[in-house]
Amino acid sequence: DQQVKQNSPSLSVQEGRISILNCDYTNSMFDYFLWYKKYPAEGPTFLISISSIKDKNEDGRFTVFLNKSAKHLSLHIVPSQPGDSAVYFCAASANGGKLTFGTGTRLTIIP
Amino acid sequence: DTGVSQDPRHKITKRGQNVTFRCDPISEHNRLYWYRQTLGQGPEFLTYFQNEAQLEKSRLLSDRFSAERPKGSFSTLEIQRTEQGDSAMYLCASSYNTGELFFGEGSRLTVL
């Protein structure tokens, strides 16, 4: 039962353009959403989060949008840089409990 | 370095042997989590502790897996009678209450 889904296994974007990564969830109890970034041979690192009481959160080049009615969130990176090439995981939790992760999207930024 | 540390980074063992992984969380963090990740998948929840209490354990976790956090500081994850299907990256993370998780670099297990 995959409660958090990332349907695009990979994405390639030109340097300087916008990268949009998508995530869907099925559990309506989820109230906190996060994005993690992972480089090879390293653990995931926290990028940005959003509570279900908001629909947008911005941090520098990174913005997360939440559409609760559609059970969908997205991560926008603008402008995209070569160092952004990594695997991005969407994660969600309910009532301060454990994080449930998606399967990840591999982002490649083309110079 | 005050991040989450895991040991060993890589363990190769034969099927049927027992293995133990250790995790040292960020010192002020009261929550500690264990996840498992296989190729092409996201981290899969195994168990988590708040201080020394084990609050939740995945229903997918076999009885061969046991985790402890005896003094609410470091934690160990033991796998008994390893099987080839146990080969994975075992990730430890810590947090302060319900804040974001900070992950270690992982312990990669290869079962031959």
Image (spheres, coloured by chain):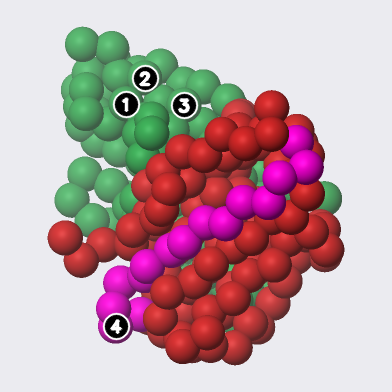
Chain colours: A green, B red
Q: What residue is rendered at 34% in x and 50% in y? A: A45
Q: Earlier in the sequence, mark 3 or mark 1?
A: 1
Instruction: Write down the region rendered in magenta.
Output: B15-29
Sort mark 4 into few (<14), some (14-19) or many (20+) by Cα contacts within 10 Å: few
> Which chain is home to disc 2?
A
Residue holding disc 4: B28
Query: Of the residues shown, which amino acid type is indicated by label 4?
Result: Glu
Residue holding disc 3: A106
Q: Is residue B22 left or right of residue B80?
A: left
Q: Earlier in the sequence, mark 2 or mark 1?
A: 1
Residue holding disc 2: A108
Q: Are marks 2 and 3 in contact (CB under 8 Å)?
A: yes
Q: What residue is rendered at 46% in x and 26% in y? A: A106
Tell which of B53 and B17 is nearer to you: B17
**Labels 4 and 1 in the same subunit:** no
Residue holding disc 1: A85
Query: Of the residues shown, which amino acid type is indicated by label 3?
Result: Arg
Q: CA distance from mark 4 to mark 3?
A: 33 Å
The answer to whether residue A33 is above or below residue A54 is above
Query: Of the residues shown, which amino acid type is indicated by label 2?
Result: Thr
Can residue A70 be seen in the rendering of this structure?
A: no
